[in-house]
Structure formats: structure tokens, C-alpha cells
Amino acid sequence: MKKFDKERLLLAVAGPVIALVVAVALTSVVLLASGKNPFEPYTLMFEQATFSDIQVLIINQASLYYIAALAVAVGFRMNLFNIGVDGQYQLAAMMAAIVGAHAALPAVLQVPLLILTAVLTGAFWAGIAGVLKVTRGVSEVVATIMLNAIATSVIAYLWLPSVFGVKVGNNNTTGEMHKSGWVPGIDVGDAGEIYGLVILAVLLGIGYWVVLNRTRFGFDLRASGASESAAAASGVNPKRMVLTAMLVSGGMAGLAGLPILLGDTHTYSLNFPTGIGFLGIGIALLGRNSPTGIAFAALLWAWLDKASPELDFHGYDKEIAVIMQGLIVIAVVVSYEAVREWGLRRQQRRVGAELAAGNVLGATSDNNTTKEVAGR
């Protein structure tokens, strides 16, 4: 491996590692300040990760986080902050649940219909923010935050019994979906079932990498994110790229709730998981927008979620995991900036050394030429 490649790898790994170390250290300080053992909670959570049933829960939860984080990462690559993934996936899941409860096609058609419904709903909701940005210059952060609130209101309206809602006790639901829309899981015995749409998350990760690194669209997306003016000078339409990126990000966000919807709950209710879109932001940051990095970050987040309940039985608050997640996000931002500056300084020193070496060689060459002329 070349020295330059090693440095790039070091810079890519340094940020997440520093962030994790700092988060663990600060969480330990919090535990010490509260008079608790700063090491036992980690031991307990690591022990939980060795149980097969917890492993299944971690993988299932990570599939939701992974898709949401990929949606956020698409926006990040375009220098856009799609903070509306939460509203996009929730509204998309509800629309898919409504379609699944009222349409009864064969499974070979039903499942693609539900996936398409989720993608189009998410893309449409994110596209509103994209249109506002390219036509009126409205910040996508402001627009998507407001759209999250609107999505909550739309969901509440669709839950009305006079619309699509079905009351089950005190719970609001969309009614059970037809079985042709259920996606069977991967049976792992007593440990339970892994969601069948975990495969979809894997395919999305592969597709994300291929599109960004092996297609003209991916190049235009990255170029526009790096410098809109430079991209425009090379013939790329920045406004079109902004709108396209928001549509792709929203469409991908719409899929984030499907693994659990089609593989477990089979209805959209008050118990449906929320907040996944916001967690996706931290996961995308920790994973540096890389599909592999995001996968590890999603598994880490899911492990913190699923292993932390055990802490309640040993006198620790399970909110320790939430504290750690928050500290990771803060540490990520700080550590990445520190690593970026360190990398720039190394690059400047390397360029300076190369220029100095070039000047020495040039001076030596000129001196030799002068001697030759004088000798003649």
C-alpha cells in the first residue's frame, strides 16, 4: 500500500475512533460523578451482545438505522442537511400500511407495490423541501423541520376512524395488512427471526456505493456538494442536482420503516418506532457517509439500544446508552474537524517539502549547466 493511501486510511479511521474513545471516557466520568462503577455497564452490555436473541434484535434494529442513515448520507454528499428523514419514513410507512390493508394482490405484486408506495411517498415529501430550495432559496433544514411537524399532523388525520384509522383498544392503527404483503423473516431458531428486508438494506448499501463511485450521476452529486460553482462550470445544473438529491434521499428514507412494518408489526400504530430519522444523522456522521462505516455505526447504535435495558436490573440507568449516543455525536463533530485540520497540516508540510526538494534539484541542475558553459 502506498504511503498516500495509508494516510487516507488513517484519516478515515481516526475520526470515528477518537469519537468513540472520547464518548466512552466522558460517559465514565458521568458514572463516576454519580457514584457508580465506570466499567461495569460496558461489561454488562458486551455480555448481552453474546446472546443470540439479542444479536437478532440488534441486526433487525440496525437495518432500520442503516437505511435512514443512508438517506441522510445522500444529502450530506450533496452538502444538504435532510433533517426530515423522520417525517418522511413515518409518513411513507403509514401510506404503505394503508395500501397494504386495502389492496390484496399476489405477494409477487403486493410487496413491490408497498415498496414503491413507500419510496414515492418519501420522495414526494422530501421533494417539497427540494422545490422550495431551488425556486425560493428556502433552507432545506427549515423546510424539512416544518415538514416533520406537518407529517405528524397528516398521520393523525389519516388515523381518524372516518378516514383510514382502525381503533384497537386505546391504540390507533391502520388495520392489519393483507398477508400477501408480509415479508417472511430468516428463522434462526430460538433466537427469533431476522427481518427479511435486512436484505433490502444490504442491497441499498451496495447500490449507494456503486451509484456514488461508479456513475456519472454520483460524480456530479459529489462535485456539486464540493463546489457548486465548479460543478456548474463543468456543465452540471446545481439546482437540478439539489432537487434530485432530495428526491433520492427522501425515497430512500421512505424505506427505513419497511423492515419492521412488513416483517413484524404489519400495521402502522402508536407503537411504531419513531425518531429513527434523527438517529440516522448521528449514524451517518459516525460512519463518514461510507456504506461500510455506516453499517458499523448502525450496529453500534442498535447494540446500545438493545443491550442497555439489562442495566436496569443491576442498579444502573439504561439512559446511559442515550448519554453515550449524544456524546458520540458531539465527539464526532469535534474529532472530525481536528482530524481534518491535522490532515491539512500534513498535506501542507508534504507539499512544502516537495517544493523545497524541487528547488534544490533545480538549483543543482542550473549550477551544473553553468559549469558546462564555463568549461566550453
Image (tube, helix red, strand yellow):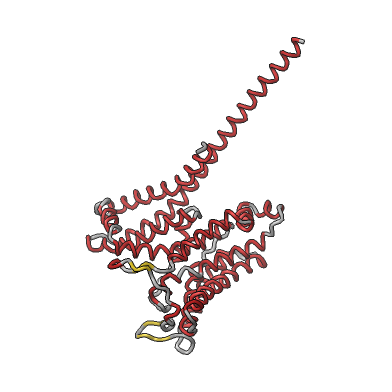
Would residue 300 be found to the left or right of residue 254 on screen?
left
Figure check: 95 above or below 20: below
Residue displayed at 44% across by 85% down? 165
> Does residue 211 appear in the picture of this structure?
yes
The reply to whether residue 318 is in sight is no
Q: Which of 318 and 257 is in front in this view?
A: 257
Expressed as whole percent of the image width and height from the top left, the position of residue 196 reads 41, 69
Residue 129: x and y, percent?
59, 68
Residue 360: quarter of image = top right
Rendering quarter of residue 245: bottom right
The residue sitting at 52% across, 63% down in the picture is: 71
- Residue 9 against residue 323 in the figure, above or below: above
User: Count the marks: how many?
Assistant: 0
Residue found at the very far bottom of the displayed protein: 162
**Where is the C terminus found, in terms of image quarters?**
top right
Across and down, in percent, residue 286 comes to: 45, 54
Please provide percent x and percent y for residue 292: 46, 54
Residue at 61%, 26% (x, y): give it. 357
Residue at the far right in the pictured view: 376
Identify the residue at the far left of this view: 314
